[in-house]
Image (cartoon, helix red, strand yellow):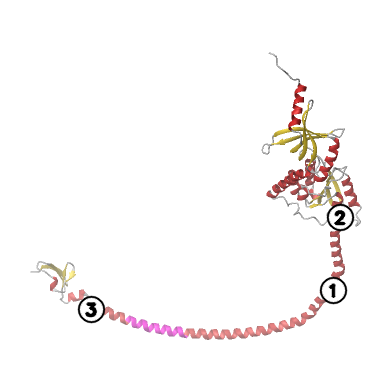
Amino acid sequence: MEHSSLSLLELNSLVRKSIRTCLPDTYWVQAELSDVRANYSGHCYLEFVQKDAKSNMLVAKARGIIWSNVYYLLKAYFERETGQAFVSGIKVLVKVSVDFHELYGYSLTVTDIDPTYTLGDMALRRKEILKRLDEEGVLTLNKELELPELTQRIAVISSATAAGYGDFCNQLENNSYGFVFYPRLFPAVMQGDRVESSIIRALEKINAERERWDVVVIIRGGGATSDLSGFDTYELATNCAQFPLPIITGIGHERDDTVLDMIAHTRVKTPTAAAEFLIDHMRQTAERLEEYTQFFYQELPGLFLRRKEQFEQWVSRIPVRVQMRLQHERFRQERLTKQLQMGWQTRLLKEEYRLQVDRRIAVALESVMQREKHRLAMLEQQVKASSPELLLKKGYSITLKNGKAVTDVAQLRPGDEVTTRVSKGEFKSKVI
């Protein structure tokens, strides 16, 4: 059985025609740049990718191209508006036409770009980093450090070949005040994907000998002014925020602050501005020292003279004040002596009166005791006279019924047994 067939070229041609028919217009597409490469002819070849928000896995990919005449204008426009290099890893909103080539396959041709979308994504990323630093309590730590009065020993993090580093050193060395500074370079990569790691390594070297330095300056000059993505990372920000020395940044970006600028102690625009800041700080310190010096030479002599005159006045008054004090103390002593004498006399009179009162009380108590003794003796005689034993000896008897004395015959009934107690013994009888 014969089957109708197409060649691969014919099939791809059908696909091309179908795509052009179905997707004839241009479309705005959100994607992330990947593998951005510009060749010798000026064309830019790249990949657009989309990743899953949770797993970060690729969910879509497409090959893209920007023709040289478009790429030259588009790249300059994008970097001027965003301050961000047109490199892999950034999110963009691009206008594309959909193409299919029989040999090269499916691709997207970029015709325009919207920088505001990338600016929004960059701002969101900065905001998230700053929020995380704030939650960790380190966002303002470096800003809270006190800048030393003398900031002469300067640890500089920059590229050794950067023009900005040379400008910085020349500005310090040729300052009009004659201040002396001691800068030392700690080389680092200041653009590209190695910015973060190389600056962190430089900070670690400075931290190992931090007693030798007053301040850290991170400057950048001579590179692409748009390539600042390396200064917008969490790891670099958290290292700088917690660094024990004040950090001054001057990385040549005049529009928006990077995350590094936001957490640094002081942010200036350029390396030259960083040098001017340090010179001005030294000038302020020198002015304060000059004020102190003028005070020492102009104010102190007059102050000492006034204090000397005041002291001499005090010394001249000492004899008179001593005599007055002695006289006062003599009067006070005499007054106290009289008070003591009067006090002892009063106390003796009080003691004598108290003794007299005590003697009167004693006599009264003795009289009361005698009366009480006599009354007790009389009561004792009365008790003895009324004693049952004494009455029995006189011939009286006591009749008891059930152990109780019978005082009334009405208490008795015929047949009751009673006990009669006499002086010597007792006997029982029955009532008839």
Q: Is residue 135 left or right of residue 97?
A: left
Nearer to us of marks 1 and 3 is: 1
Q: Amino acid at mark 3?
A: Ala
Residue 289, compared with residue 334, is above or below; it is above
Provide residue 45's location: percent of width, then percent of height.
81, 33
What separation in Å lies between label 1 and label 3 (alpha carbons)?
112 Å
From the viewer's side, name the closer residue of 23 and 428: 23
Counting other residues with Cα less than 10 Å from the Cα at mark 1, is it few (<14), some (14-19), or many (20 or more)?
A: few
Q: Is residue 374 left or right of residue 8?
A: left
Asked if marks 1 and 2 touch (Cβ < 8 Å), the reply is no
Sequence order check, earlier mark of 3 and 2: 2
Q: Is residue 95 shown in magenta? A: no
The part of the chain drawn in magenta is: 356-373
Sequence order check, earlier mark of 1 and 2: 2
Sequence order check, earlier mark of 1 and 3: 1
Nearer to us of marks 1 and 2 is: 2
> Which structural element holds mark 3?
helix
Asked if marks 3 and 2 touch (Cβ < 8 Å), the reply is no
Provide residue 189's location: percent of width, then percent of height.
82, 41
Counting other residues with Cα less than 10 Å from the Cα at mark 2, is it few (<14), some (14-19), or many (20 or more)?
A: many
Q: Which quadrant: the C terminus?
A: bottom left
Q: Residue at x 86, y 58 (%)?
A: 283
Residue at which label 3 appears: 385
Residue at which label 2 appears: 279
From the viewer's side, name the closer residue of 231 and 399: 231
Which label sits on residue 305?
1
Outermost residue toward the top in this view = 1
Outermost residue toward the left in this view = 432
